[in-house]
Image (cartoon, grey):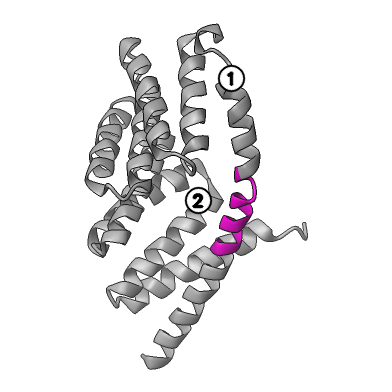
Amino acid sequence: NQMKRKLILLLSLLFIMIFVTESSAMNDSISDNLNSMEIISEINLYTIEGVENKIDALLKLSKTILPESAKESIGFAYQALGLANESNLNKEKVQALNRLAKAYYFLGQYNYAISFFRKSIAIGKEINYQKGLAKAYSNLGLIYDNLGVYDSAIIYHSHSLSFEIEAGNNKRIASTLNQLGNNYLYIEDYDKALENFLNSLKINKEGNDTSE
């Protein structure tokens, strides 16, 4: 049992290294995104044809500006949600609600974030919007990770995993399995932690295998 615990801790450290490397690679592109945001923000919204295109532009602005200004990110997301509500575009409602939730999550305002994610899930279920549901469940899992409520985190990450498996998104599957491994590690369920870490490692290895 002591040996198993050591093995799990080593695997956990391995995954931390893997995903920190991926995160730093993503952060390198933030400055490029901000430059593109400056270009987009100069465009008058009224010159963009089609409600869906306007919502898409607002959501891209909301996402890109979040690291610099959560307040502006929230403003763009609310504008997008307003347009989606006016035109009764449910898929866009889900996207806007997820974007609002992520902005409040970024601010550490978890109650607001949870509320918006749950609204997003309710609409996503009605229209079977799997991508939106996977994101909302995953982010709810991350919130409960931060709150230390690991039983709830496991439930939400497991919901997210089911949608990711159905979509065949191996990168997200591996990431979610790693999150589940960490959750089980925290509640000292070492067998399930090891199972999830090993499954994540296997999928990562398959994704990185370029021998064929």
Question: Residue 47 in the image: x percent, y percent?
Answer: 55, 7
* Residue appearing at x 36%, y 77% in the figure: 191
Secondary structure that dominates the magenta span: helix
The image position of residue 134, as x and y in percent, is 39, 42
Residue 201 percent coordinates (x, y): 55, 67
Question: Between 208 and 182, which is closer to the camera in this rendering?
Answer: 182
**Apparent side of residue 200 relative to residue 204 in the rendered image (left or right):** left
Compared with 90, 23 (above or below) is below
Identify residue type, mark 2: Arg
- In the displayed structure, does residue 188 sit left or right of residue 48? left
Displayed quadrant of residue 127: top left
In the rendered structure, find residue 117 and report the number of the disc placed on it: none
Q: Which residue is mark 2?
A: 172
Residue 44, horizontal then vertical, whole percent: 54, 12
Can you say whether 79 is above or below 159 in the image? Answer: above
Asked whether residue 166 is drawn in magenta, I would say: no
Disc 1 is placed on an element classified as loop
Q: Which residues are magenta?
A: 19-30
Q: Secondary structure at mark 2?
A: helix
Structural crowding at the residue carrying mark 2, measured as other residues with C-alpha within 10 Å and reported as few (<14), some (14–19) or many (≥20): some
Q: Residue at x 41, y 62 (%)?
A: 179
What is the three-letter code of the residue carrying label 1? Answer: Glu
The N terminus is located in which quarter? bottom left
- Write the residue at 37% across / 27% down: 75
How far is disc 1 from disc 2 in space, using C-alphas?
34 Å
Residue 25 covered by magenta stretch: yes
Name the residue carrying label 1: 42
Give me the residue at 51% from left, 69% from top. Answer: 16
Residue at the right extreme?
A: 211
